[in-house]
């Protein structure tokens, strides 16, 4: 723990100013009470040394270090660059130590963290069985829960219309609303008040008069509309800070078949089904945070698949040494292959149409979730994956989503749309030729992505998930995953080993 030290700055006995010195970046040391008990077991249930059951559980802490707060702390006034000309005495900050107009904050860190440092409870249960000589099958469950994770969001958000209770979440109706009822607010197209012109009447460019809808917490529409509404503390603007209130969980089934080298053959097969969910995927400091917490009043609104969630993973490798013997020209041949099949990262379907990027006027840096449109043929997670032009693939149908009514948050779950996966198969043919006792010549013929599978990549705008993209390119991509996975490549090599 860190005690607070009080300093008195005095001009004379009658004129003193009390200043509280901050001796640490946090009000208390969140690493002081880290406790990490662990337990594990293993036993042979059949006493034949061919079956093993193992398991364990443990708590692991992620001590908060300077890399989280350093870049934020030194760049925030008054610690950051700030010039004061002719300061007052005895309190030089009587008129404020921040530069004029510095009423907002980006990438700050809370001074009063929640409880302890981030921690993870990990547990696993593993069953291994020797099927036959040199071959072992493993089936295991691995899971974890994580608490007090660092997230980032606006701690001074705009007030909702029902402040201070701003926790209502959007509803997901069974069909598209056509009137206000049951907690749904419907704005008809004739009202000419929807964010996207395609939902207003014909007086709006490209309008079709379908209207728009919203539900859950509502925020007032500011004037002008490209601003934000009244904030909790009107003396400040947005206060983007990191705080440790995040939570996540991970569950997985892992299957592995391992054959050690025997009878000229060695190979492995691994399959993992996993699911990771959290309420905000965030790294540390300014490193690579994925997105802000959208609804600061109810962080559960952002509860969905982790930004790095990959549901299915298959990886296999094999090496076969041809059994030819007799002379240096027919012996020494090997064939190897590596195959990887992986489902894609999730996509966050969000608004992108001028002010519709932020329909609730929360001032978020990234677009907020859209609404389901319930268009014919659409359903949640609807994937198209069709070639619509030479070199262009439509991954999802943007007509399945629409802009949210002004003042509301969207009802599409965060990171809910499956992203494009990856298929890669590599094959190598290797020939080792012994020239002398110390000199070996190796020939290699290698083929990468031999099936020449096109792996869908990002979009023309760099993000595959936005709706109402300029030029009607929503849901489309013209890129592959190259250079990570390239089109088919064949190469030859000679290598001398000595």
Image (cartoon, rainbow, N blue to C red):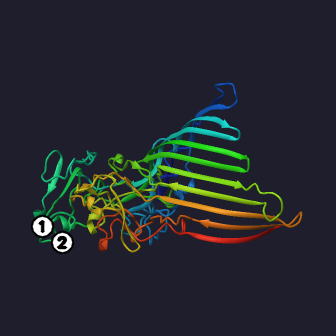
Horizontal placement of 124 versus 477: left or right?
right
Q: Nearer the viewer, residue 255 or 311?
A: 255
Residue 343 position, x and y percent, is: 47, 54
Residue denoted by label 1: 201
**In this rendering, is residue 208 above or below 2?**
below
| Residue 35 in sight from this viewpoint | yes
Q: CA distance from mark 1 to mark 2?
A: 9 Å
Residue at image position (51%, 59%) is 423
Q: Nearer the viewer, residue 211 or 494?
A: 494
Q: Quadrant of the N terminus?
A: top right
Q: Secondary structure at mark 2?
A: loop
Horizontal placement of 479 versus 388: left or right?
right
Using the rendered view, name the quadrant where residue 307 is placed. bottom left
Residue at image position (16%, 60%) is 211
Q: Secondary structure at mark 1?
A: loop
Q: Quadrant of the C terminus?
A: bottom right
Residue at image position (15%, 71%) is 204
Residue denoted by label 2: 206
Q: Nearer the viewer, residue 155 or 394?
A: 394
Horizontal placement of 195 versus 82: left or right?
left
Residue at image position (22%, 47%) is 174
Residue 467 position, x and y percent, is: 31, 64
Residue 169 is tagged as: none
Q: Residues within 10 Å of mark 2 (few under 14, many from 20)?
A: few
Using the rendered view, name the quadrant where residue 130 is placed. top right
């Amino acid at each position: 723990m860190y005690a607070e030290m009080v300093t008195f700055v005095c001009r004379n006995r009658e004129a003193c100013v009390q200043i509280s010195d901050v001796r640490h970046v946090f009000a208390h040391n969140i690493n002081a009470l880290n406790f990490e008990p662990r337990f594990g077991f293993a036993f042979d249930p059949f006493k034949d040394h061919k079956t093993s059951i193992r398991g364990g559980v443990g708590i692991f802490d992620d001590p908060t270090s300077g890399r989280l707060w350093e870049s934020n702390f030194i760049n925030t006034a008054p610690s950051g660059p700030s010039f004061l000309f002719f300061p007052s005495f005895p309190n030089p900050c009587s008129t404020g130590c921040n530069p004029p107009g510095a009423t907002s904050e980006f990438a700050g860190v809370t001074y009063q963290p929640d409880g302890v440092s981030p921690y993870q409870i990990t547990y696993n249960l593993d069953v291994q069985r020797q099927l036959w000589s040199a071959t072992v099958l493993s089936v295991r469950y691995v899971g974890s829960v994580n608490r007090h994770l660092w997230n980032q969001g606006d701690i001074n958000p705009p007030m909702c219309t029902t402040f201070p209770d701003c926790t209502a979440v959007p509803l997901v109706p069974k069909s598209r609303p056509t009137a206000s009822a049951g907690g749904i607010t419907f704005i008809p197209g004739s009202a000419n008040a929807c964010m996207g012109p395609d939902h207003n009447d014909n007086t709006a460019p490209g309008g079709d008069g379908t209207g728009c809808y919203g539900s859950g917490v509502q925020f007032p529409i500011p004037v002008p509309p490209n601003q934000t509404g009244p904030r909790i503390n009107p003396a400040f603007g947005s206060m983007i800070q990191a705080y440790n209130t995040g939570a996540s969980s991970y569950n997985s089934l892992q299957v592995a078949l391992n054959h050690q080298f025997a009878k000229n053959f060695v190979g492995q097969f691994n399959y993992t089904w996993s699911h990771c969910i959290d309420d905000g995927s965030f790294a540390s400091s300014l490193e690579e945070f994925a997105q802000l917490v959208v609804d600061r009043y109810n962080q559960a609104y952002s509860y969905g698949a982790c930004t790095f969630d990959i549901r299915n993973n298959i990886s296999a490798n094999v090496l076969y040494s041809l059994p030819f013997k007799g002379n240096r020209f027919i012996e020494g041949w090997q064939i190897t292959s590596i195959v990887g099949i992986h489902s894609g990262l999730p996509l966050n379907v969000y608004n992108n149409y001028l002010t519709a990027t932020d329909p609730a006027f929360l001032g978020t840096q990234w677009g907020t979730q859209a609404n389901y449109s319930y268009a014919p043929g659409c359903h949640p997670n609807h994937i198209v994956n069709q070639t619509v032009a030479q070199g262009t693939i439509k991954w999802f149908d943007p007509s399945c989503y629409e802009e949210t009514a002004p003042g509301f948050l969207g009802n599409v779950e965060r990171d809910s749309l499956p992203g494009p996966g990856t298929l890669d198969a590599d094959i190598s043919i290797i020939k080792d030729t012994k020239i002398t006792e110390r000199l070996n010549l190796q020939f290699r013929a290698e083929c990468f992505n031999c099936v020449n599978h096109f792996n869908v990549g990002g979009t023309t705008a760099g993000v595959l998930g936005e709706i109402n993209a300029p030029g009607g390119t929503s849901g489309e991509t013209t890129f592959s995953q190259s250079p990570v996975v390239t089109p088919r490549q064949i190469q030859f090599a000679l290598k001398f080993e000595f």
